[in-house]
């Protein structure tokens, strides 16, 4: 079992002064099942949620320092990310077909009726003809709809090029400068994305 970064889902409650958005940190761990040959195949919540402050908004002077500063234009990369997140979050279709060989990412516990990719940003310029093994970090913003309403979600993805197309190698990977080199038998972490409820 390995400890993974926390998620920060948002919750909306109706108080005397109107709607209030609250953010919670939930620690989760990757758990290896008996039949997984040692590879992590499930998420487990390891402690009760903790209420935390919401994320700070970027100021105008911070725009040039954003880690994902390149907007990805419509094309095969954007289509692949949209199709993967749609299958991953709705449970309709086979999301594993978009994964790099050997990668296993557990599906989320709940599914959405509809998922729409709103925009996609990359850390660096997207190569037109990536070489096999090239890695690209992107951040996808989606709008997911369930019976409770619409939820804006953000998914950092690590993509790897193979045979002329991009495949998902990890969901929400740790920053490259801070993460140790994985062992050949390790699987990428898949913590929950940052989320907040959208009030219409």
Image (tube, rainbow, N blue to C red):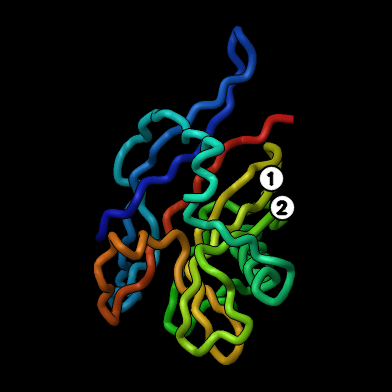
Q: Position of residue 143 (x, y in %)?
A: 68, 49
Marks 1/2: CA distance? 5 Å
Rate crowding at label 1 as few (under 14), some (14 to 19) or many (20 or more) other CA atoms within 10 Å: some
The answer to whether 68 appears left or right of 81 in the picture is left
Q: Is residue 29 above or below residue 161?
A: above
The residue identified by callout 1 is 146
Rate crowding at label 2 as few (under 14), some (14 to 19) or many (20 or more) other CA atoms within 10 Å: few
Determine contact: label 1, label 2, CB under 8 Å.
yes
Q: Where is residue 63 in the image (x, y as percent from the top left)?
A: 54, 46
Q: Which residue is drawn at 61% across and 9% down?
A: 17
Which of the two residues, 74 or 189, is positioned nearer the viewer here?
74
User: What numbered label is drawn on residue 6?
Assistant: none
Which of the two residues, 100 or 130, is positioned nearer the viewer here?
130
The residue identified by callout 2 is 113
Q: Where is residue 145 in the image (x, y as percent from the top left)?
A: 70, 46
Badge 1 marks a residue whose secondary structure is: strand
Where residue 175 sits, quadrant-wise, is: bottom left
Q: Residue at x 69, y 41 (%)?
A: 150
Number of marks in picture: 2
The answer to whether 93 appears left or right of 163 in the picture is right
Which of the two residues, 67 or 104, is positioned nearer the viewer here?
67
Ranked by sequence position, the earlier of labels 1 and 2 is 2
Q: Which residue is drawn at 34% across and 35% down?
A: 48
Quarter of the image where the C terminus is located = top right
Q: In this view, does 64 lie above or below 83?
A: above
Q: Residue at x 59, y 72 (%)?
A: 95
């Amino acid at each position: 079992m390995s400890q993974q970064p926390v998620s920060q889902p948002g919750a909306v409650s109706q108080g005397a002064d109107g709607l209030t958005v609250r953010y919670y940190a939930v620690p989760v761990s990757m758990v290896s099942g008996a039949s997984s040959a040692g590879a992590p195949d499930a998420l487990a919540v390891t402690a009760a949620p903790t209420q935390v402050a919401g994320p700070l908004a970027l100021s105008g002077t911070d725009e040039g320092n954003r880690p994902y500063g390149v907007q990805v234009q419509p094309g095969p990369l954007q289509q692949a990310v949209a199709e993967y997140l749609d299958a991953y979050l709705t449970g309709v279709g086979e999301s594993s077909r978009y994964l790099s060989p050997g990668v296993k990412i557990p599906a989320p516990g709940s599914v959405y009726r509809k998922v729409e990719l709103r925009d996609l940003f990359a850390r660096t310029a997207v190569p037109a003809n990536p070489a096999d093994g090239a890695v690209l970090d992107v951040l996808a913003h989606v709008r997911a709809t369930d019976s409770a309403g619409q939820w804006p979600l953000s998914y950092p993805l690590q993509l790897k090029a193979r045979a002329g197309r991009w495949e998902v190698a990890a969901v929400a990977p740790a920053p490259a400068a801070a993460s140790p080199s994985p062992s050949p038998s390790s699987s990428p972490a898949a913590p929950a994305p940052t989320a907040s409820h959208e009030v219409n």
